[in-house]
């Protein structure tokens, strides 16, 4: 199953068309994309009965698939080569911080360059369907609603400012959390634990990796987080980035006005951001 946010309304992808969820369900389900997760099992059963859409997918005005999650977690240094390029020790346990939901934007966005050290981080984003505490790793994938493409954009000067790092603030500027284009259930891809990630700037490949290279894979992240924080349906987890970020280069390279950033994950799609 694939879902999209069409100008703030939840829609189900059926082939090359989409069905507006509220209209197709005759009001049984809300048009609010965030409202579906507490009713995920019921919704999936209904969605399996939908066989046609009324609007071409090409005409959809795509917004963030999950625009207002209750919580937004992110994971740092979750790929060994990325830790090495930033000259940082590989963490024994997941390094988890918060991004604030107000930073989220859709898959096609113009972003203002507000500083001189905005960095890119291509990431797989996990959307929870089942919340709670103490979710075991062996049950974690059963608690996932879907996957989407994300960028954990970072203002590196802000991140390093002060006596302690300011990760959450530096990564939560306006539109610093692009996601999309769709929410894809794990059964739609051959292996949700082995997805190719690719990021380009102006056509130049700057990141190329695979989610199988995660130090702490998705089930372990869900287990670790849920043993400390209660998860809620619709929560997002940005799962970390492969090597190739700007701060890891010599000299460092950051995003500038005129840059076009494209992020792709196999089976999930692509997102594009233009910097002004």
Image (cartoon, grey):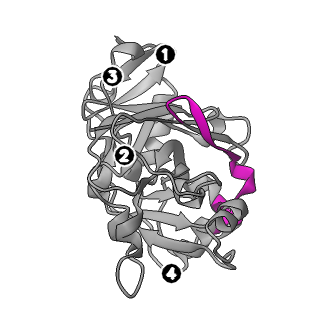
Q: Residue furthest front?
A: 251
Asked if residue 171 is positioned above or below residue 97 in the image, the reply reads above
Foreground residue, 26 or 234?
234
Helix, strand or loop at mark 2: loop
216 in the magenta segment: yes
Q: Return the disc, 3 or 4, that comes first in the chain's sequence.
A: 3
Distance from the alpha carbon under mark 3 to that under mark 1? 10 Å
* Residue under label 3: 24
User: Which quadrant: the C terminus?
Assistant: top left
Distance from the alpha carbon under mark 1 to that under mark 4? 41 Å
* Residue under label 1: 51
Distance from the alpha carbon under mark 4 to that under mark 2? 23 Å
* Residue under label 4: 228
Helix, strand or loop at mark 4: loop
Q: Return the disc, 3 or 2, that comes first in the chain's sequence.
A: 3
Foreground residue, 41 or 102?
102
* Residue under label 2: 66
Q: Return the disc, 4 or 2, that comes first in the chain's sequence.
A: 2
Distance from the alpha carbon under mark 2 to that under mark 1? 24 Å
Distance from the alpha carbon under mark 3 to that under mark 4? 39 Å
């Amino acid at each position: 199953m694939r879902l999209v946010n069409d100008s703030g309304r939840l829609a189900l992808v059926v082939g090359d068309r989409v069905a507006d969820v509220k209209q197709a369900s005759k009001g049984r389900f809300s048009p609010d994309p965030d409202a579906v997760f507490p009713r995920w099992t019921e919704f999936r059963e209904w969605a399996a009965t939908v066989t046609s859409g009324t609007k071409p997918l090409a005409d959809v005005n795509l917004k963030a698939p999950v625009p207002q999650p209750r919580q937004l977690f992110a994971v740092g240094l979750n790929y060994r080569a990325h830790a090495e390029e930033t000259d940082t020790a590989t963490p024994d346990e997941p390094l988890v911080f918060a991004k604030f939901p107000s930073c989220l934007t859709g898959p096609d966005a113009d972003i203002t360059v507000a500083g001189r050290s905005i960095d890119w981080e291509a990431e797989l984003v996990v959307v929870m369907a089942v919340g709670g505490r103490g979710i075991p790793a062996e049950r974690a994938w059963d608690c996932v609603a879907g996957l989407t493409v994300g960028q954990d954009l970072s203002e590196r000067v802000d991140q390093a400012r002060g006596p302690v790092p300011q990760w959450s603030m530096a990564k939560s500027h306006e539109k610093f959390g692009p996601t999309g284009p769709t929410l894809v259930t794990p059964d739609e891809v051959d292996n949700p634990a082995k997805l190719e990630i690719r990021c380009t700037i102006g056509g130049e490949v700057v990141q190329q990796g695979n989610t199988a290279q995660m130090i702490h894979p998705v089930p372990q992240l869900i287990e670790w987080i849920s043993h400390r924080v209660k998860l809620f349906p619709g929560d997002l987890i940005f799962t970390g980035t492969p090597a190739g970020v700007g701060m890891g280069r010599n000299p460092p390279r950051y995003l500038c006005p005129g840059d076009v950033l494209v992020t792709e994950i196999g089976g999930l799609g692509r997102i594009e951001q233009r910097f002004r």
